[in-house]
Image (cartoon, coloured by chain):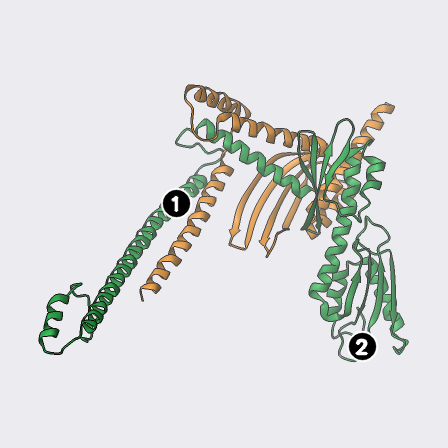
Amino acid sequence: MDNSICQVYEDEIQSLEEEIKLLTEKYEESQQESTFFSDEEILMSIKSLQREFEGESKGHESPSDLKAQLESLEKDLSFLMKFTGIQFTSHSKKTVEKTRSRTVQKHRLSGNCHSLSFQLEFQLLEMQNKESVSAAITDLSIIMKSGEDSDMRKLVSSTEEHGNLLTFFRSLSSYAEWCEHRRCTFLHFK
Amino acid sequence: MEPGQGELSPAFPLAGECQEKVEEGKAYSPDGVFAYLEMLEARAHKAAVKQEETEQQEEKLARLKARVEELRLQRDELRAKVDLQQKRQLGKEGGVSNPAQPSARAVLEWKIKSIKAMLEVFYLTGISGKLTKRGVCFCISTAYEGTYLDSYHLDLLTKPEVQIYRHSVPIFIPLQQIAKKYLQTDIRRFLSVLSDHLNAYAGRRYQADQLQEHFSDQIEGTLQRNSLCNLLVFNYKVPSKSKTFPFNVRLLYGDLCCSLPTEVVISCTPNAPASLAETAAAHSDLFRRVALHKVFRSFSSAVGNVDGAP
């Protein structure tokens, strides 16, 4: 009899711990997404943290670790943007569903690829299988800001239909490069 | 021997009892007395152990109960925090001003999280990576119509010239050939061509896997395929009410950057009626234009139509 009471408590403990985890994630995500700090504020924070550190020494992650981590990540991001030609100007995500086996996040992404600007909205579904995590795009919607020609419109509608986000970016990339190349060639002949 | 009462009673009710026994005239031999003493000792020990167990159990219950209450409190506080956060966000527009000025550390942590999220998005574009001490490590992701499949890594060194240090590209993808052609002159092109190969391979494999997973009832025997998944041979039958004759199909994907076959050969069994030749021709066209698993999906949904008509 006692054992079953123990079990009831233990089950409740487990369910509370899970709920706390989900609530914490929800709070942190919402906090992250609704905040914005400009580059100046970032720089000021780096300086202020270094001053603080010189005053006293703290136990956990030193400011130089944070600064180093930030710089390394910024270098990676700027390299990728330069290399692929894809610049993201804004990104937001919101978890709309989260269970033990599946997570659905809604993303809003805007940016440009060379001169072509885009705005995307999609849902990313991640499912935990036995050994791995699988990801799939649903509800993809694409808005191209620049003057649309028929090729671009075809690409957009077929991409939206099948959720082909990866193909969209690769096609966009090579199309943009071609446009750029064409522009340079015309300039050359002016 | 006195039967034990089973209740917790004073641990050693021995001396008086023992004396009684002896005086009652039941002449216990010295051995008998010792045996009796041993029994009483054992009984007392058992009782002590049981009492300890009960106390431990009660302690455990109390601990668990306290923990439950602690967690409930924590959970309720979090719920209130989240509710307040949602209300604030609905009430205000534009940027949120925190009542408390965020610490410098919090600002940097925000930025770090924000950049990490953007780097994750690059994964969805097909090419992502990170800089390394001696070069770059690229990650090529593959997908088929919105479902992301395996990703492959390429660790490149950039000095003295661009070379591939390590990679996880399967051996049947012509990596060296592609590298020889483009790596030195145009890395972007190199990655783009490699990505085409990998995505096409992943797409072909995905179609074959889907076929085996969802339409195995229409396949007779095993589906034979090579590692590159550009040659598939199998027998299939179209679901229909009357007797069906299985078709044998050989799909060759001659273009390694394409996930549709370039060559389709369908044959029927020798005893099949001649009319099936028409069906075979229709199927052959279908296989060339439509993804493999979708072809079979259309067969399934066409049951009830004229035999064999797709």
Residue to which mark 2 is pinned: B244
Q: Which label number is shown at residue B259?
A: none
* Residue A38 visible in image: no
Relative to A158, does residue A67 appear above or below in the rendering? Answer: above
Q: Residues within 10 Å of mark 2 (few under 14, many from 20)?
A: some
Relative to B103, does residue A96 appear above or below in the rendering? Answer: below
Which chain appears orange?
A
Disc 2 and disc 1 on one polypeptide chain: yes
Element at badge 2? loop
Residue drawn at point x = 14 percent, y = 77 percent = B27
Q: Position of residue A97 (x, y in %)?
A: 52, 52
At label 2, which amino acid type do we have?
Thr
Q: Earlier in the sequence, mark 2 or mark 1?
A: 1
Q: Position of residue B168 (x, y in %)?
A: 72, 44
Residue drawn at point x = 84 percent, y = 68 percent = B248
- Quadrant of res A184: top right
Locate the C terminus of chain B by quadrant: bottom right
Compared across the picture, whether A91 is left or right of B292 comes to left
Image mark 2: chain: B
Which chain appears green?
B
Cα distance in 3D space between marks 2 and 1: 63 Å
- Quadrant of res B229: bottom right
Element at badge 1? helix
Residue drawn at point x = 44 percent, y = 44 percent = A24
Locate the N terminus of chain B by quadrant: bottom left
Q: Position of residue A154 (x, y in %)?
A: 76, 47
Residue placed most toward the observer, A141 or A55 = A55
Residue drawn at point x = 39 percent, y = 58 percent = A11
Q: Which label number is shown at residue B78?
A: 1
